[in-house]
Image: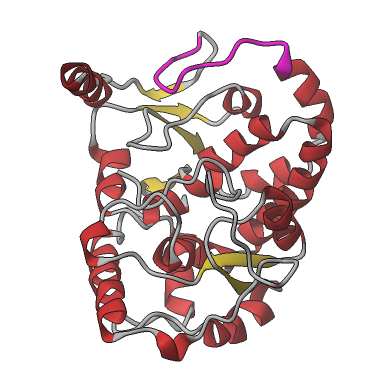
Amino acid sequence: MSAAAPTLHGLAAGETGRPDSADWTIPQRWSDYTAEEHAVWKILFERQTALLPGRACDEFVQGMRDLPLEADRIPDFRALNDVLKPKTGWEIVAVPGLVPDDVFFAHLANRRFPSGQFIRQANQLDYLQEPDVFHDVFGHVPMLMNPVMADFIQAYGEGGLRAQKLGTLALLARVYWYTVEFGLVQQADGLRLYGAGIASSRTESVFCLDDDSPHRVAFDLPRVMRTHYRIDDFQEIYFVLNHLDDLLELARVDFEPLYRAVSGMSAFQPGDLAPTDRVLNRGTGAYAARQRLATQQKG
């Protein structure tokens, strides 16, 4: 199951508190982290760094090497920014958790990545509803060291502000979900993950590449925009880029005509295959079927 699964990027349901700053940023207060919190980071960091070689794409692995990330301590955002900002112009800003969509998009459009300042508890290692510092920093920041992803996420932030005005945010959110969070890419030496929701999850890092259950389908933008996703369990379908550079083409797309076209089409459920799909691996759907049966039996 994914390590963090917000419904979109916005404020968690029922949450009303907010920091004093208009952009929702807060001090990280790195010195306030406890030994227990650093220990949780260490467990998460060591098991993912042992698991990801041969699974994560080359760009993710290179980003990990270039960043001042250590097993023994939660990263200090200031030290990360000293490396990240000269490389791609991005910086990490601390926020208390999920933030309103307009705030999230404005940060991205200005090359600021909002990261949860807190870390999960020791009994939440494998699943957390709200993204924490491990999901945000370990999962996302290595890819922000890559110029292609850096440009794509900025373009996504700009596009998100436009999509809000057009009332089409749900369609654009699916693009983010199936790329930045749960994307796969084809490398010369095999299929690799690059999405942060996978990279920060021990179980989904294995499931997405090794399990027979999910479909793996060549990325097609209108198809992705029509596809619902799972926020509470493994994905039933993963979309695969031919090359990470394909994200640059997405960043140049005029989405407004696509919104009009896709809005008039029926949506796909996560486990569906379309007649026009270029299917790389047809999944059995066995995992999703077991989960549905278990839910029915509980009901």
**Left or right side of 55 for 136:** right
Q: Please tell me whether residue 295 is drawn above or below residue 109 in the rendered image.
A: above
Snapshot colouring? secondary structure
Q: Quadrant of the rendered structure where residue 288 is?
A: top left
Determine if residue 194 is in view: no
The residue drawn where x is 33% and y is 36% is 233
Q: Quadrant of the rendered structure where residue 113 is?
A: bottom right
Q: Which residues are magenta?
A: 263-274
Q: Position of residue 232 (x, y in %)?
A: 37, 37
Q: Which quarter of the figure is the N terminus placed in?
A: top left
**Left or right side of 120 for 251:** right
Determine if residue 117 is in view: yes
Q: Position of residue 97 (x, y in %)?
A: 52, 61
Observer-nearest of 190 and 271: 271
Q: Position of residue 194 (x, y in %)?
A: 46, 52
Q: Which quarter of the figure is the C terminus placed in?
A: top left
The residue drawn where x is 79% and y is 43% is 252
User: How many numbered circles are shown?
Assistant: 0
Observer-nearest of 187 and 270: 270
Q: Position of residue 188 (x, y in %)?
A: 42, 47
